[in-house]
Image (spheres, grey):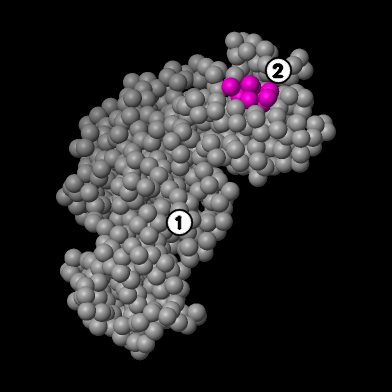
Amino acid sequence: MGRDLSALFDPVSVAVVGASDDPAKYGHAIAAQAVRANGRRPVHLVNRRGGTVLGRTAAPSLSAIGEPVDLAVVCVPAAGFEAAVDEALECGARAIVAITAGFAETGAAGRARQQAVAERVRAAGAVMVGPNCLGIADNTTDLFLASDTFTPGGVALLSQSGNLALELQLRFAPHGLGFSRFVSLGNQADVTLVDLLADCARHEDTRAIAVYAEDFADGRAFAEAAAVAGKPVVLLTAGRGDASARSAQSHTGALTTSADVVTAACRDAGVELVATPRELTVVLAASAGPRSGAGRRVAVLTDGGGHGVIAADAVEAAGLSVPEIGTPARERLREVLWEQSAVANPVDLAGMGEQDPGSYAATVEALLAAEEVDAVLMTGYFGGYAASEGGLGGGGTALAEGEREAARLIAARHGATAKPLVVQSMYPGSPSCRTLAAAGIPVFDATEDAARALAATVAGRTAPGIVPLPLPAAPMEETGYTRIRAALEAAGLAFPTAREVHDECELLAAVAGFPGPYVLKALHLLHKSDAGGVALGLAGTEEVLAAFREMHARLGAPAYSVEAMADLSDGIELIVGVNRDPRFGPVAMVGLGGVLAESLRDVAFTLAPVTAGRALDLLRGLRTAALLDGVRGRPPVDVASAAAAIETITAFAAAHPEIAELEVNPLLVGPRGALALDSRAVLG
């Protein structure tokens, strides 16, 4: 069930410690907001000088209040922070909102102070948001403990930025969105983003959860909580650069960036990942309601060719499709439109809207009823007639009223279907568009926003979920080539026959032990091929011996591996790797492999471990997936065996947290199975 945060969002009483009449102090802003809900619960203002604050008597200390305090907001300078928290706990506080800054964000000493306070809070059975936060608000319980007022609504915002909350407040307004809760995360010394996400998921009045986070701390726990939230979760994050890949020692590490990890975690958990506050608003406007699409097929309705073509491109860029409409639906459209209207998709009224605004409603109804249509995007001038009381065509008041009636009809048609409808209008604030918005139809002024909103409603994008981490296996202290190869083989991964050798005598004995052709590898080199440490296709003893002498003279490796040469003729080389991210744990990478892995960069990412079914989806999603089914006379390969191998590799890596990077490259997949030809591991 997660932590009990009831005292944080619906306390019996509140005290603001550090309340002030000085508008320059945060204690003034918090106190001014807190007293707005004085009728809901007792609100006490505490100032060490006593006197009055905001015209109310202020207590000189929490103890002087003379009754228990359920939630304390601490706005005092850092020097007095610990004493204020201790007094709050002594007075029975079950929750603390720590505005005070000067802790982990200042360095090691501040982090140690912060940790000590958090331990005291937890030992007392209380919870603490912050320190270094900007407060909280819950419109559903009349709890106002932030410096600003938030419009009520169904979105819970969990944010590391206060200014972002103010921007979203402005962006939400045209879409009728508001806040159920706002929490400034601060340093997350005690109550974490994951705790808050889980609690908001249980909160009945929260319909969607918006998150702005720069530091996830435990990113995997965030993904796991979001995956089971049962509500839309939209994430805006920063710092998704590729700096983490600079020190990587494997292809997997070099190809895995922070952006890849966050994107994979969000996709696995079903989180909508956005890049800007505007996009966050667009997605929330589409997903905060109950409407979701059953598929990706979109009908575009326009009253001008240019808008239709632009909208179709935007829909396809958003990952959806604009299919040609079938004969039955076309015939229905022909019944309600005039001859010059286009009915293939995009559907273009071609001026009919100026003659009969009701044609918008009739066309929307026909498109929503079409079997080959999952959603409708209406784009163009609609809204302009009522906005200008004249608009195009000089129809005046009659044309404006016709458009308003069309808006009412569209709202009614929309209410009778489960299919999503979004609108892009040149006049989004017009009376007609406001009628649509009031009916739950998202209205935007930008075509790309309308397309993105539709993409957010697609129910067909089923999140694969997060596979639980296995229990840790006995740690490996040495991960050389032979050792990691043997460990993976014991886990069920197939390798060619091999023998480790150290001199010519052992080499000859190895060659005599199994038939050729052979491969010779110099060991203890991270990238053997790059260093010229691999010789392929050695026919017999003489060729193996010659290759050994040349390689040893050049590289002087302490050990070598003699292996049976695999048949490469009908196989495809894949790369399978796992890189351990400090925030999200093991992250798997699957793609086209071999020596060109980094050059081709045809790879996919997901949190590890990976089931065979999920592995199949990753393989089928590669740009070069067609190679798996055979091209230019080559037979199809055994994709199921490849998927099983991926499951084995990623499960092994997930069970060994001491391994920072694990890679099998290449994993040769042929018509009759999968064979690992090389492997490497790097300890953390």
- Residue with the mark numbered 1: 212
Residues 535 and 43: in front is: 43
Where does the image place residue 248, in percent across and percent down from the top left? 41, 55
Q: Is residue 189 above or below residue 268?
A: below
Instruction: Quickly name the residue at label 2.
Output: 337
Say how many tags the image has: 2
- Which dot, 2 or 1, sits closer to the camera? 2
Quarter placement of the C terminus: bottom left
Q: Residue at x 27, y 32 (%)?
A: 494
Q: Residue at x 58, y 48 (%)?
A: 174
In the image, taking residue 426 as reference, residue 66 lies left or right, namely left
In the picture, residue 505 is in which quadrant?
top left
How many residues crowd mark 1 within 10 Å: few (<14), some (14–19), many (20+)? many
User: Is 100 rendered above or below residue 138?
Assistant: below
Observer-nearest of 506 and 165: 165
Label 1 residue SS: strand
Q: Residue at x 65, y 30 (%)?
A: 405
Amino acid carrying mark 2 in the image:
Leu
Q: Position of residue 165 (x, y in %)?
A: 49, 59
Q: Is residue 359 magenta?
A: yes
Across and down, in percent, residue 585 comes to 32, 51
**Res. 99 in view:** yes
Between 153 and 89, the one nearer to me in the picture:
153
Q: Amino acid at mark 1?
A: Tyr
Whether residue 541 is visible to the viewer of this picture, yes or no, is no
Q: On the picture, is 557 further left or further right than 211?
A: left
Q: CA distance from mark 2 to mark 1?
A: 46 Å
Q: Is residue 358 above or below residue 223?
A: above
Which span is picked out in magenta? 358-365
Left or right: where does residue 523 sit relative to residue 170?
left
Residue projecting furthest to the right: 394
SS class, disc 2? loop
